[in-house]
């Protein structure tokens, strides 16, 4: 793949765009990610950043709630049915527009490979996310995603820690959950700790994206193998029916012959697998 696509998602106003601008500032790029202003939503379409690297940070629309419509939207984004640079349209928009959604999932390079969920430390709904995001956690697990959660704060929080709540809400491991000062909103200089944390967040997201890509490629390979097996069985059934029609074999004879062929194929696969295992350099 030419690049790894990492989606930054979360509630409206949590600081997704601020987080992306923090990354841009850290790497010396202009801060060009539109942030929320006066209660209006900042991001309305899928926009990518860090194009000069071998990975992209993708900004998406925030969510006000976690109803089924947003779940479907997120699934379409992850599968590549909604592509980078597409507008994200919703029924409750002031001027609803038609959403361009592909019928089929995109090939692996066109999908989202990694996830960073940004939450606001002072979000009054924080305690609710553990329950309301249960469906999302299950979906991430089934699809092979390893999300990273980031809790942004805009004030001195002392020793307060919400990483456990964030990890449980998003389904992220404890070592993939971070608290980060929102220097963009606070208009303050980066501390060395914040710089280090941003690098750790990106590193964790890239590791998770690599794991997702490997699992997906393995799954696609297995699907192709299963399709080929089904085709082989179909070809066998057609051949046997022709032979039965031509030579008037009984149904019992055909069934016995087919069973014998399948058993022989199964044994060939078992022996082949055992040989590959013995000859493997990792054995």
Image: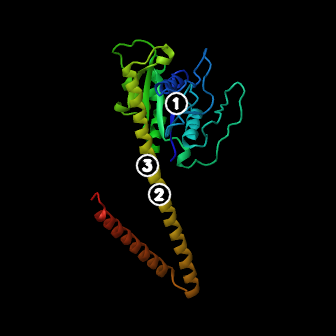
Quarter of the image where one finds residue 70? top right
User: Against 46, is 275 above or below?
Assistant: below
Specify the label residue 215 is tagged with: 3
* Colouring: rainbow
What residue do we see at 33% from left, 65% from top?
276
Q: Residue furthest toward the front? A: 28
CA–CA distance in space, label 3 to label 1: 22 Å
Q: Is residue 64 left or right of residue 124?
A: right
Question: Considering the numbered disc 3 on the image, is that residue within a helix, a strand or a loop?
Answer: helix
Name the spot of residue 124 as percent of width and height, x first. 48, 17
Q: Nearer the viewer, residue 251 or 239?
A: 239
Q: Nearer the viewer, residue 50 or 126?
A: 50
Badge 3: residue crowd in 10 Å (few <14, some 14–19, many ≥20): some
Q: Which residue is mark 1?
A: 9
Badge 1: residue crowd in 10 Å (few <14, some 14–19, many ≥20): many
CA–CA distance in space, label 1 to label 2: 30 Å
Q: Which residue is mark 2?
A: 221
Quarter of the image where one finds residue 149? top left
What residue do we see at 39% from left, 73% from top?
263
Question: Would residue 171 be visible to someone looking at this image?
Answer: no
Specify the label residue 123 is tagged with: none
Question: Considering the numbered disc 2 on the image, is that residue within a helix, a strand or a loop?
Answer: helix
Q: Nearer the viewer, residue 133 or 277?
A: 277
N-terminal of the two: label 2 or label 3? 3
Q: Residue furthest toward the bottom? A: 247
Question: Would residue 215 be visible to someone looking at this image?
Answer: yes
Name the spot of residue 73 as percent of width and height, x first. 59, 36
What residue do we see at 36% from left, 21% from top?
193
N-terminal of the two: label 1 or label 2? 1
Query: Do labels 2 and 3 touch, CB within 8 Å?
Result: no
Q: In which quadrant of the rendered image does the C terminus lie? A: bottom left
Name the spot of residue 17 as percent of width and height, x first. 54, 25
């Amino acid at each position: 793949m030419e690049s790894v696509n990492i989606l930054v998602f979360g509630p409206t106003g949590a600081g997704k765009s601020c987080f992306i601008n923090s990354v841009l500032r850290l790497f010396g790029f202009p801060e060009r990610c539109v942030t929320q202003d006066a209660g209006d939503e900042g991001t309305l379409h899928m926009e990518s950043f860090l194009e000069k690297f071998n990975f992209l940070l993708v900004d998406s629309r925030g969510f006000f709630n976690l109803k089924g419509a947003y779940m479907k939207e997120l699934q379409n984004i992850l599968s590549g049915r909604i592509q980078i640079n597409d507008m994200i349209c919703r029924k409750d928009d002031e001027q609803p527009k038609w959403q361009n959604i592909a019928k089929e999932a995109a090939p692996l390079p066109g999908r989202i490979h990694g996830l960073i969920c940004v939450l606001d430390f002072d979000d009054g709904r924080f305690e609710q996310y553990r329950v309301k995001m249960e469906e999302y956690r299950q979906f991430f697990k089934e699809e092979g995603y390893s999300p990273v959660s980031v809790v942004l704060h805009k004030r001195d929080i002392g020793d307060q820690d919400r990483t456990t709540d964030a990890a449980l809400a998003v389904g992220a491991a404890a070592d993939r959950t971070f608290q980060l000062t929102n220097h963009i909103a606070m208009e303050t200089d980066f501390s060395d700790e914040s710089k280090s944390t941003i690098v750790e967040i990106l590193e964790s997201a890239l590791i998770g994206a690599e794991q997702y890509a490997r699992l997906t490629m393995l799954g696609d390979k297995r699907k192709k193998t299963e399709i080929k097996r089904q085709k082989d069985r179909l070809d066998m059934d057609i051949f046997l029916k022709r032979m039965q029609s031509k030579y008037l074999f009984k149904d019992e004879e055909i069934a016995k012959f087919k069973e014998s062929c399948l058993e022989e194929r199964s044994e060939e696969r078992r022996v082949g697998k055992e040989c590959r295992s013995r000859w493997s350099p990792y054995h």
